[in-house]
Image (cartoon, grey):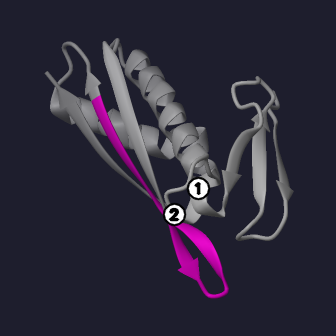
Amino acid sequence: MKKSASAHWSGSITEGQGTMSSQSGVLREAPYGFKSRFADGPGTNPEELIGAAHAGCYSMALSLGLGSAGFTPVSIDTDATVTLLKDGDGFSITAVELACRAKVPRIDAATFDRIAQATKLACPVSKVLKAEITLDARLEG
C-alpha cells in the first residue's frame, strides 16, 4: 500500500507561501508558510501534520495491541507534541512527546503500561521517525 501527499511552494522562505494536499483529499491546498511554522500565523505546518499522523497511528496501533491481548478500548485519545529546534544552519525535529489517555474495561495498570510502551515502538510512524519519542500513557477510569 502506498499513500501520497504533495506540497507546492512559491517565493522566499520568509515571505513565500505554500499549500499541502493529500491523496484522500482531506488536505486540499491547505496553506502553510513561515509564519504558520515559526510564529502564530494562519495555516498548518509539517510538524503539526507529523504530530497528527503520529497521534493517529499510535491510537490505532494501541487499539490493535489491546485487542490482541483480549481488551476492547472504549476510547483512546492521543496528543503528539513535536519539537523543532535550531540545528546549526537549519532545524531538526528533536523529539515527539506522546500523551495518551485511554478507557479500557477490565485491564490493570501494569498490563496497560506494558502494551502502551510496546505500541510506542511498534507504531509505524514511530519506526519512521529518528527523533526521540517519549510517551505518557495513562489509563482512565
Where is mark 1, residue-wise? 36
Q: Are marks 2 and 1 in contact (CB under 8 Å)?
A: yes
Front in this rendered view, residue 131 or 7: 7
Identify which residue is drawn at 55% across, 55% down. Answer: 41
SS at badge 2: loop
CA distance for labels 2 and 1: 6 Å
For residue 46, side relative to residue 126 (left or right):
right
Circle 2: residue type: Ala
Q: Position of residue 23 (x, y in %)?
A: 81, 28
Q: Where is the C terminus found, in terms of image quarters?
A: top left
Q: Position of residue 81 (x, y in %)?
A: 42, 52
- Magenta stretch, overall SS: strand
For residue 109, side relative to residue 67 (left or right):
left
Location of residue 36 with respect to 20 vertically, above or below: below
SS at badge 1: helix
Where is mark 2, residue-wise? 39
Q: Residues within 10 Å of mark 2 (few under 14, many from 20)?
A: few
Q: Residues within 10 Å of mark 1 (few under 14, many from 20)?
A: some
Identify which residue is drawn at 75% across, 70% down. Answer: 13
Identify which residue is drawn at 86% across, 58% down. Answer: 10
Q: Where is the N terminus found, in terms of image quarters?
A: top right
Q: Position of residue 62 (x, y in %)?
A: 43, 28
- Residue 9 visible (yes or no): yes
Location of residue 109 with respect to 132 vertically, above or below: above
Location of residue 26 with respect to 34 vertically, above or below: above
Circle 1: residue type: Ser
Q: Which residues are magenta?
A: 84-101
